[in-house]
Amino acid sequence: MRLSALDEVASAVGLKKGQGVAEARAMHPGLDVVPADPAADFRFLEALADWCDRYTPLVAIDGEDGLMLDISGCAHLFGGEDAMLRQVVERLSGLGLKVKGAISSNPGLSWAAARFTGGGLVVADEEAEALLSPLPVQALRIAAETVALLKRVGLKRIGDIIAAPRAPLARRFGGDLLLRLDQALGREGEAISPRRPLAVISVERQLVEPIREEEEILELTGHLAEGLVGGLEARGEGGRLFELLLFRVDGRVFRIEVGTASPLRAARRIRSLFTERLRVLQDDIDAGYGFELARLNVLRGEILRESQGHLEGGDGKQERLAVFFDQAAARLGAQCLRTPLAAPSHWPDRASILVPLLDGLPEPPPEALPPMRGPRPIRLFSYPELVDVTAEVPDGPPASFRWRRTHHRVARAEGPERLTAEWWLDGEDALPRDYFRIEDLTGRRFWLYRQGLYERGTVSPQWYMQGIFA
C-alpha cells in the first residue's frame, strides 16, 4: 500500500506520493489514511465539469484533478475575464474545494499558470515567456522521464530551454519537448476536446429566485422552447434530440434528454415531451433548495420540410402517429418501440434487425433479397438454446429431444435445410447448420438445427433450438 495523494499538511511534514503507508505511519503515527477510490474521484470531477457548463459548453477533463474550459466569446457575459475567473474560483471554494485557475490564449500556458503559480492570473500573450521562464520544466506537461533527463544535464527551468539551441534539444530529448514548449508559448495551436457534443442551438434562463416545483420547471421549459423556434426557423431545421439542463443551487446538475421520430419545432410539443419524461424521473430529480439556472439545448437537428395541414384543422394520421412515438419514447425510453427490417443475409440470426422508431426507418438494402427456401417460425430466439437430441446418425432428423427440462417425442419432421456460414463474417472454419421443422406428439412445432456434421471434422455436432412456430 502506497500514498497516492496528499493534502497540504502531509506534504509540509515531508511525506511524498508513492511512499509506503507503513513507512509514513512510522514517521507520523497519527497519520490519517483513507483508501483511494479513483472511480469516485472521476465521477466527482465529471460532476464539477457539469457545474462548469454554466460558463461554457466546451468543458474538458484535464488529467485526474483538473478541468480545461474554452471560454472564447463567453467572458463578456460575466463581466470580463478577470471577473469570470474570480467568480469561478470563489463559487467552487464556497463548495469546500481548494481551487486554482488561470486564463490565457492557449491551454498549455493556462495549465502552467494554474498549477505552478499562485493562480488567479489572466496572462496576456506578450507575458507568456516572462511567466514561463522561472517555472520548472515539468510545467510543460512532458513525461517524467524527460524531466529527469533535463535535470540531469542542468536544464531545470523553462527559461533554460527557451535559451538553448533547438536542434540539439530535439535530437536528445525528442520532438515532444519542443512541441510542448511552442504550445505553451502560443506558437503552436492546441484544441480542447469537450467531453460532451456541442449543442446546435442553446437557450438558457438565469433565475432570480430558485424554482423547485415540477409545474414551474415545465413552464420554464415551455418558455425556453419558444426561444428555440427562431433559431431553428433560421436554419430551416427541426430538433431531433433535445436536452434540458437544470443547475441546482448547491452545484449539482441534472440532464434530461428527449428524442423525436421526426424533426420538431413546435414549442408546445417540446414541452409535452419533457412533461412525459419528468413524470418518469420525478423521483430521481431532487430539487433540493431549487434550481437557479435552466438551459435547453438542441443536440441534433434535421431539415424540416413544411407540409400542408388539413383544412378542418385536425392533425393528420402520420402526425398523430409521430406524436404517439415521441410520447411513448419520452416515458418508456427510445428502445420501447422498434420495427423489424430485413437485412441482406441468409443466416437467420442476421436476416432482420430491430430499429428504434425514433431513429427513423432506414432504407431497405438496394439488392433484392433471395426468397427463403422454407417457412420461418413466428418467434425467433435472440440466442439459440442448446438441446439434447436423439437422432439417427449422420443426417437423420430428431426422434426426441429435451429442452428446458421437458422431454418431447417427435411425431413429424421436415428437413434438413442446410445453411452454410457466411465465411466473409464468420471465417472459413465456421460450421454449417442443418435446420429441421419438428412437430411433437402434442402438436407443438419447433425449429431446431444441428451445427456441424457427423463424421466430418474433429468437433462433435451440437443441436440448438432456434425458434417456435404457431
Image (tube, rainbow, N blue to C red):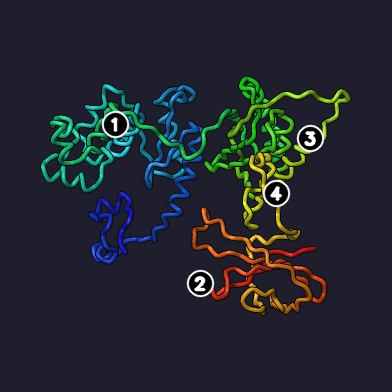
Q: How crowded is mark 1: few (under 14 residues within 10 Å), some or many (20 or more)?
A: some
Please name the residue that numbered disc 4 is placed on: 340
Name the front one of labels 3 and 1: 3
Mark 4–mark 1 distance (CA, rounded to whole Å): 52 Å
Residue shown at the point (64%, 65%) measured from the top left: 384
Determine whether the residue tagged by mark 1 lies in a helix, strand or loop.
Answer: helix
- Mark 3–mark 2 Cα distance, whole angstroms, equals 55 Å
> Which residue is at the front of the view, 283 or 383?
383
Q: Which amino acid does label 3 sit on?
A: Gln
**Label 3 belongs to which residue?**
318
User: Which quadrant of the view contains residue 201?
Assistant: top right
| Residue 404 visible from this viewpoint | no
Residue at 30%, 49% in the rendered image: 8
Residue placed under numbered mark 1 in the picture = 183
* Residue 456 can be seen in this image: yes
Kind of residue indicated by mark 1: Gln
Q: Distance between the residues labelled 3 and 1?
A: 55 Å
Q: Nearer the N terminus, badge 1 or badge 2?
A: 1
Residue 61 in percent (x, y) is at 42, 42
Q: Residue at x 65, y 60 (%)?
A: 382
Identify residue for label 2: 457
Q: Which of marks 3 and 1 is nearer the N terminus?
A: 1
Q: In this view, does 333 lie to the left or right of 47?
A: right
- Give the foreground label among 1 and 2: 2
Q: Does label 2 or label 4 sit earlier along the sequence? A: 4
Question: Is 303 displayed left or right of 7 in the figure?
Answer: right
Q: Is disc 3 placed on a helix, strand or loop?
A: helix
